[in-house]
Amino acid sequence: MTEEEIISIGDVVRFQAQEQPDAVVFTFEGDEMTYAALDAGSNRAAQALSSKGVSKGDRIAYMGKNSHLYFEILVGAAKLGAVMVPVNWRLAPPEVAYVLNDCQAKILFVGPGFDDLAGKIEKDLDHVQLILGSEKAEGDYPGYPAWRDGFADEDPMVVCAEDDDALQLYTSGTTGHPKGAIMTNGSIFSSRSAGIAEEDMMDWQKPVPGEITLLAMPCFHISGTGTGLAVMYTGGSAIVLPEYDPTQALDLIAEYNISKIFMVPAAIQILLNHPRARDVDFSNLKYITYGASPIPLELMKQAMDVLGCGFVQMYGMTETSGTITTLNPEDHDVNGNERMRSVGTPLPGVEIKIIDPESGEPLPPRTIGEISTRSAKNMKGYWNRPEATAETIDGDGWLRTGDAGYLDEEGYLYIQDRLKDMIITGGENVYPAEVENALYANPKVADVAVIGVPDEKWGEAVKACVVVKAGQELTEAELIADARTRIAGYKCPKSIDFIDALPRNPSGKILRKDLRAPYWEGKDRAVN
């Protein structure tokens, strides 16, 4: 196979196993996986999945913390043309069951420690035929490695196309239920589709032999799975952390001479606050890429001083298969120039325009409107949601992000607000409707509205404004604890204001901006 023949995720691993079979692709808790081992293991995984009726277009799911075996299973599915659905293990049981039923997963792989969660929802699953412990036998579930090893190392060689579904990630939903964003082989490996030669890449993008990436963000986000896929595509090597832990991160940076890490700003802050942060040798660290929320200038100053590497800010979303604009190292100014308030310029092959949210007409520079983008990176659509897809992607391929911002005369993009009522807390997306539905389920709640307010550590925090039913008494702690039984902890309010009535317009719509206004007063943008 030649590099030009690479079409799919499976092809990437076939090619790398051919070119550098003994090179280590993933290291997990001291266990090294070479490209040859990944190729062979994924072949066995494909045969095992096929034996259970998994075929092209089918979905399988993985619910667990990061692992090298997650990528082996993902590649095995890809070799059949099947689609991996990584499930956010922080979700509450009803949310997990919804995702698994919505995607119609045939097989569920469960990471260590999540067999109890799987057991709570097993009876509610409509399509799952087999549950396996991903690294070992979990509770009543057999282990994946032993199951896999009962099958031959034979590549099924299913023909895949660029437009075939390859990965499905769930995003928070405006109506209270998450939506499955479908990424294709083409959108995942869009740099190839855009015809970007290595010599035209920016320095931080270029693969360098021997460099090692730390994969620290969760694989149920595009930041985690996307990092692993990029490592495989470039023939690189990554150290995989089960979940972000600053002590482990510092240990691995020192032990493995880590060159690149992607982190959300909250994770950078946690790392810098670690008592050992100033004792670690960061001289081999070349780049920190960061995104999901803006970074405060003071935190950036501290990070540049302590880590001493180049910084790259990334802006994108699940629906764009990750990054679409970057603020490159040369634009990072410790004194805070105007460009530091931007999210940079579009990647090659990516188009950005600002449109009037109502008419859809393009707007001139420095005029705030909705950010719209078109490229090979755009998702195929939302799984079984044709109406939601049509609302997001128009007939010409332009995807409406729901973010409000403007372009300057040099093409730098600035984000000012969100047109959709979304909250980003610690890099996680939360829609008010999800939280409001959970709070409304409490019989003592008469009315509720959820907003995002500035938070120094997490960027934004979830706040609820609640009207209690007449004659009822309700405490903040009681209501939050009740909500935790229905939604993930990170979605639950960090604080609650009990008020007499919610502000509404004549048609009855909650005036969320009026509720948010006091908390964002004095800020130069209405996102944090």
Image (cartoon, rainbow, N blue to C red):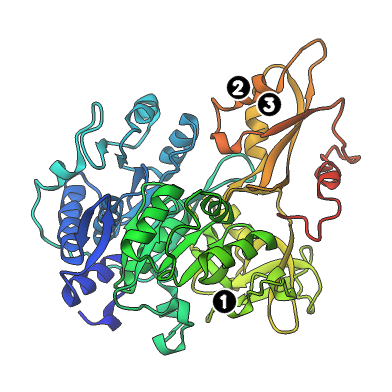
Q: CA distance from mark 2 to mark 1?
A: 45 Å
Mark 2 is on which residue type? Asp
Residue contact at pointers 2 and 1, CB within 8 angstroms: no
Frontmost residue, 430 versus 495: 495
- Quadrant placement of the C terminus: bottom right
Label 1 or label 3, whichever comes before in sequence order: 1
Q: Which residue is mark 1?
A: 329
User: Spatial distance from mark 2 to mark 3, Cα to Cα?
Assistant: 11 Å
Q: Which badge, 2 or 1, comes first in the chain's sequence?
A: 1
- Depicted 53 relative to depicted 156: above or below: above
Residue type beneath disc 1: Pro
Q: Is residue 452 left or right of residue 49?
A: right
Callout 1 environment at 10 Å: few (<14), some (14 to 19), or many (20+)? some
Few, some or many residues within 10 Å of mark 3 (<14, 14–19, 20+): some
Task: Please identify, in this view, whether the residue under mark 2 or under mark 1 is nearer the observer.
Answer: 1
Residue 358: image location, x then y, percent: 79, 63
| Label 1 element class | helix
> Percent x, y for residue 291?
57, 61
The N terminus - image quarter: bottom left
**Most extreme residue toward the bottom, as rendered?**
199
The outermost residue toward the right is 506
| Residue where numbered disc 2 is placed | 482
Residue placed under numbered mark 3 in the picture? 440
Give neighbour class at mark 2: few <14, some 14-19, many 20+ (Cα, 10 Å): some
Rendering quarter of residue 141: top left
Would you place residue 35 above or below residue 173 in this image?
below
- 486 vs 338, left or right, is left
